Image (cartoon, rainbow, N blue to C red):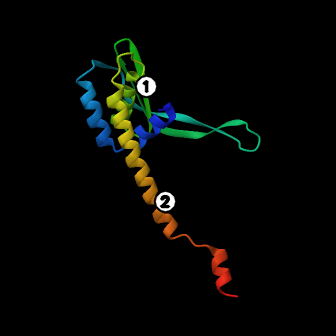
Amino acid sequence: MELIERDYILCECPLKHLVDFVAKLEDQYEITVSKAPEICLTMVKAEDSVEGQAFFLGEALTTTCEVVIGKESGLGIVLEDQPERAYCIAVLDTLSKLKDRNWPEIDAFLNAEKAQIMKAETEAHTKIMQSAVDFKLMDDAHP
């Protein structure tokens, strides 16, 4: 699974699912919090779609956390004030760098959450499309 897809799933899945899953992993690994979750402002970088020039859109409120497992460290960063989610993402980021990581269990969790997120997005899209209006069709109905 790509890093971007993994991060999207971890940011979108229900917090309770993520916290419960990481709690199980805490029993298997010795996790040290090297930087406790804290709120900060992060500059959001964007790119002009016409000229392709980078610029800073503004600041966003984020929560960051850093943990260490063995000799590896990992970072969790998430929008808004979400210290638990930032910690969980930092743990999974660190585990992704370890050689003895428990990937089958982590992959199963990520795939299950991805399926739920996709189902919710499909249902939302279906609801939106039910209220869509085809104006050309309406125009044809009244000559």
Residue type at tag 1: Leu
Q: Residue at x 29, y 42 (%)?
A: 16
Mark 1 vs 2, N-terminal side: 1
Residue at 27 percent of width and 20 percent of height: 29
- Residue 124 picture quarter: bottom left
Q: Quadrant of the C terminus?
A: bottom right
Q: Residue at x 55, y 69 (%)?
A: 132
Secondary structure, mark 1, is strand
Considering every residue shown, the one lying at the far left of the view is 27
Residue at image location 49% in from the left, 31% down from the top: 3
Residue 72 at x, y percent in the picture: 40, 15
The outermost residue toward the right is: 51
Query: Rounded to the nearest whole Å, what is the CA distance between mark 1 and mark 2?
Result: 33 Å
Label placed on residue 83 = none
Quadrant housing residue 100: top left
Residue closest to the eye, 98 or 78: 98
Check the image and name the residue furthest to the bottom. 143
Residue carrying label 1: 75
Residue, far front: 104
Mark toward the viewer: 1 or 2:
2
- Image position of 104 (left or right of 138): left
Could you say whether the residue bearing mark 2 is in a helix, strand or loop? helix
- Picture layout, residue 42 above or below residue 129: above
Q: Is residue 17 visible?
A: yes
Mark 2: amino acid: His
- Image location (x, y in percent) of residue 12: 41, 44
Q: For residue 70, what is the image quadrant? A: top left
Mark 1 burial class by Cα count in 10 Å: few <14, some 14-19, many 20+ = many
Q: What residue is shown with label 2?
A: 125
The x, y position of residue 13, in whole percent, is 38, 43
